[in-house]
Amino acid sequence: MKVENTQVQMRKGILEYCILEIIARGEAYASDMLEELTSAKMIVVEGTLYPLLTRLKNAGLLDYSWVESTSGPPRKYYTLTPTGLQFLDQLRLTWQELVDSTTFIINHKKSK
């Protein structure tokens, strides 16, 4: 078994949450999301991001608007819907529970 496979699965498992957190700060352009995820060492390619954004949009969690660009074609900027904000709030609680549980397990001392 290769550790890289498990690392990839762990990153995939939190990618949706990270994307929603980025968008929650305000309108977000896909290239900016990719840049931030890459800076955070979350290895993501366009072929992963765009289908995920489409799935989140179809689920009613995201909306988008087209904004004219001075350096090319219009850009699609994503925002969270009210449903998306509620969904993100639930994910934040789940994330904190996972952090707490994992920290407990890592720090738990075996009793003799």
Image: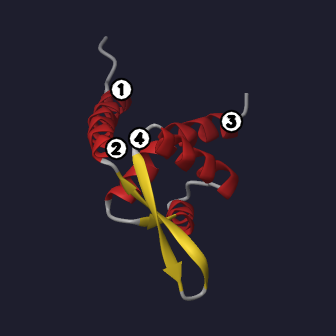
In the rendered image, the vertical position of residue 66 relative to residue 103, given as above or below: below
- The nearer-to-camera label among 1 and 2 is 2
Is the residue marked by circle 3 packed among few (<14), some (14-19), or many (20+) residues within 10 Å? few
Residue picked out by circle 4: 60
SS state under label 1: helix
Q: Identify residue type, mark 4.
A: Gly
* Quadrant occupied by the N terminus: top right
In the rendered image, the vertical position of residue 97 relative to residue 11, given as above or below: above
Residue picked out by circle 2: 84
Residue picked out by circle 1: 105
Q: Is residue 89 left or right of residue 72?
A: left
- The nearer-to-camera label among 2 and 4 is 4
At x 44%, y 65%, the residue is: 28
Circles 2 and 4 in contact, beta carbons < 8 Å:
yes
Upstream in the sequence, badge 3 or badge 4?
Answer: 3
Residue picked out by circle 3: 5
Q: Alpha carbon of mark 3 to alpha carbon of mark 4: how far?
A: 31 Å
Q: Identify residue type, mark 2.
A: Gly
Q: Is residue 104 left or right of residue 18?
A: left
